[in-house]
Image (cartoon, rainbow, N blue to C red):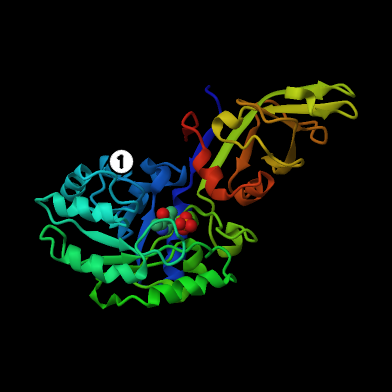
Amino acid sequence: MSRPTRLIIDTHALVHNLKKIQEFAPQKKIIAMVKANAYGCGLSEVIPTLDGRVYAFGVACIEEALDVRRLGSRSPCVLFQGVFSAEEYVLAAAQGFDCVLHQPHQVQWLLQTPLKHPLKVWLKVNTGMNRLGFRPYEIPRVMQTIKTCSWVAPQINLMTHFACADEPWRPENQQQMDAFAQINVQEFSHISMANSAAIMSFPDTHADVVRPGIMLYGVSPFADKIARDLGLLPVMNFVSALSAVYENPPQGQVGYSGTWKSERTSRIGIVAVGYGDGYPRHIEANTPVWIQGAEVNIIGRVSMDMLAVDLTNHPHIQPGTPVELWGKNIAVERIAQKAGTSGYELLCQISERVRHR
Ligand SMILES: *Cc1c(COP(=O)(O)O)cnc(C)c1O
C-alpha cells in the first residue's frame, strides 16, 4: 500500500471534450493547448490520447515542445511565446516547431540566424490584451521583413488572443474583433483567434484554427457555469483516502491554530491530502469533499499533507475509505470558487508528488 493521493486522468472524457469542441467549431483545425504539463493533467496521458486527432499542440516554450517530442509525437507544436534566445530557432526549425513572433527582437534574431530547415511562424497581433504582440498597424511592416527571409516558411500565420472572452458581455470582445478586422488577412495562411471561451461564445472568431485549453480538460472558463452545463466532462479526478478516523470531545479543537472546535462529541476524519499536493490552503467554510456518495465538509486549516473532515453524521465511514477532492462528483469549479481562484489555477497547482493511477 502507498499513499492514496492520486490523479486519475479520464482519457475518455478528454476525447469526449474534443468531440464537443468539434461540435462548437465544425470543420475547424484544432490546436490542443497542452502548456503547463497539459494543465496539470500530465502530458504522458494527454499527448498519446490526442495525437493524430488534432492539428497541432500548443505550448508556451521550447522545453514543453521537446517534452511532447519525447513522448513520441511528431505532430506540429506551436511555441506561443516564441523563442527566448536566437539559438532556440535552430532547435525549433530542426524539430519542426512553429514559432510565434510577438516582439521586434524575436524578428531580429530570426533574420540573424540562418536556418537549414524552413521555420513556420505565426505573427501575434495585440488587439487589446496588451501583453504580447505587434499592434495591428505594425503587421504589414513585420510581414514585409520576414517574407524576404529565405528560411521563413512561405505560409505565414496570424493570431491574436482575447482578454475577456470568459465574460462575453464585455465590450472589449467586440473591440478586439474590430481591431483584428483592420488587418489585411489575405496574405496569411492560417488565422487563429479563439480560446475555449471564445469557441463557445463567439462563433465568428473561429477563423481557421481554434485553440482550446481549459475546455479540453473539462473545466468551464465561465465563472457562472460548470463543465456539465457546457456538455463537458471533467478529465482530472483528484482523489485520496481517509488515513485516520477518531472521536473528538466537545470543545476539542482540530488542526493548526485550532480554528475549528467541536460543539459536541464529533467524529473526525483525516484525509491524506494537503496544500503540499496542490489542494488550496485558503478555502471558505463548508468546502466539501466526496466520501461514499455524500458531501462532507472540510474543517479547520488545510495542512501540508492532510486535512480534516467532519464525519459526525456518517458514523459508518471507516479509515481507508476513498475520498474525491474534485472530479466527477465535486466540480473543480466549485472548489475554485471556495478558494477564491479559478479552475485553471487548481489544475496547474497539482504538485509533482501526486502520482497518477
Ligand atoms: C492558454 C492559451 C489558450 C487556451 O486558453 P483556454 O482559456 O485555456 O482555452 C489559447 N491561446 C493561447 C495563446 C494560450 O496561451
| In the depicted structure, whether residue 39 falls above or below residue 160 | above
The location of residue 266, given as percent across then percent down, is 84, 28
Label 1 crowding class (10 Å Cα cut-off): few <14, some 14-19, many 20+?
few
Q: Is residue 286 left or right of residue 53?
A: right
| In the depicted structure, whether residue 190 falls above or below residue 254 | below
Of the pair 291 and 305, the residue shown nearer to us: 305
According to the picture, the residue beneath numbered tag 1 turns out to be: 63
Count the marks: how many?
1
The location of residue 133, given as percent across then percent down, is 36, 60
Secondary structure, mark 1, is helix
Of the pair 145 and 310, the residue shown nearer to us: 145
Query: Quadrant location of residue 33?
Result: bottom left
Q: Is residue 57 left or right of residue 285?
A: left
The location of residue 56, given as percent across then percent down, is 30, 57
Evaluate whether residue 68 shows in this view: yes
The location of residue 10, given as percent across then percent down, is 48, 47
Query: Quadrant location of residue 268?
Result: top right
- Label 1 sits on what residue type? Glu
| In the depicted structure, whether residue 205 falls above or below residue 74 | below
Figure quarter occupied by ligand 1: bottom left
Of the pair 102 and 355, the residue shown nearer to us: 102
Evaluate whether residue 75 shows in this view: no
Residue occupying the point 56% across, 72% down: 171
Q: Is mark 1 within 8 Å of ligand 1?
A: no
Q: Is residue 118 left or right of residue 18?
A: left
